[in-house]
Amino acid sequence: MIREEALKLLHDNMKNQNLRRHCYAVEAVMGGLYDRLEDGEKKDSIRELWKIAGLLHDADYEITKENEPKKNHTKHILEWLKKADAETDIYDAIAAHGWGYVEGAPEPKTKMQWALYTCDELTGLIVAVALVKPEKNLASVTVDSVMKKWNSLSFAAGVNRKQIEECESRLRIPLHEFVEIALSAMQSIHEELGL
């Protein structure tokens, strides 16, 4: 699957601009995490798979969030990926990103799967930090400003910080560095994110 196909699949099934932007953010962060985790073994084709998994991870969220039980999130996108004959790595990463939330979702096993699982929530926290800044943009966000909000559990209360913290044991990336990678990736596409 190439990005153009993935983008069409996303846009055909997700109309909400903020939800699309979340998917763009996760796509960018997955590229940054691939660069960090696979340094020395860079293969553009594999990096693209990581990014497509990030782009499509919530492609059916708009359909399932209100009209179906929570357990159906990822069910549709996984069916669409099978129909499109998408790579197994993309399919497996998207299936595993629902671990702990979606009934029957497998525990992440590979670096790609753990990267998607851990960065998904972080993008929301970074956006929340940007939105409370006077400038309301990513350029004004620093790693320190994200970390200052980290322990304020009432701030972006829906963000599962424990899930993000898995980056340390599962990916061997310290939290501060993990935030830095995600923030830098998101800043690189700030226009697409409207921030």
Image (cartoon, grey):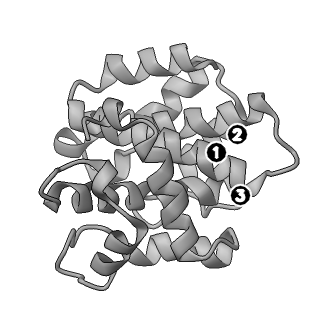
Q: Residue at x 55, y 57 (%)?
A: 181
Point out which mark residue 149 bears: none
- Quote the CA–CA distance across marks 3 and 1: 12 Å
Q: Residue at x 17, y 50 (%)?
A: 136
Name the residue beneath numbered marker 1: 92
Q: How many marks?
A: 3
Q: 51 or 62, which lies in front?
A: 51
Where disc 1 sits, the SS reads helix
Quarter of the rendering occupied by the N terminus:
top right
- The answer to whether 91 is drawn above or below residue 159 in the figure is above
Name the residue beneath numbered marker 2: 89
Q: Amino acid at mark 2?
A: Asp
Q: Residue at x 54, y 44 (%)?
A: 94
Q: Which mark sits nearer the N-terminus, 3 or 1? A: 1
Where disc 3 sits, the SS reads helix
Q: Residues within 10 Å of mark 2 (few under 14, many from 20)?
A: some
Q: 118 or 43, which lies in front?
A: 43
Q: Is residue 109 left or right of residue 189?
A: right
Name the residue beneath numbered marker 3: 111
List x then y, in percent, for residue 26. 46, 45
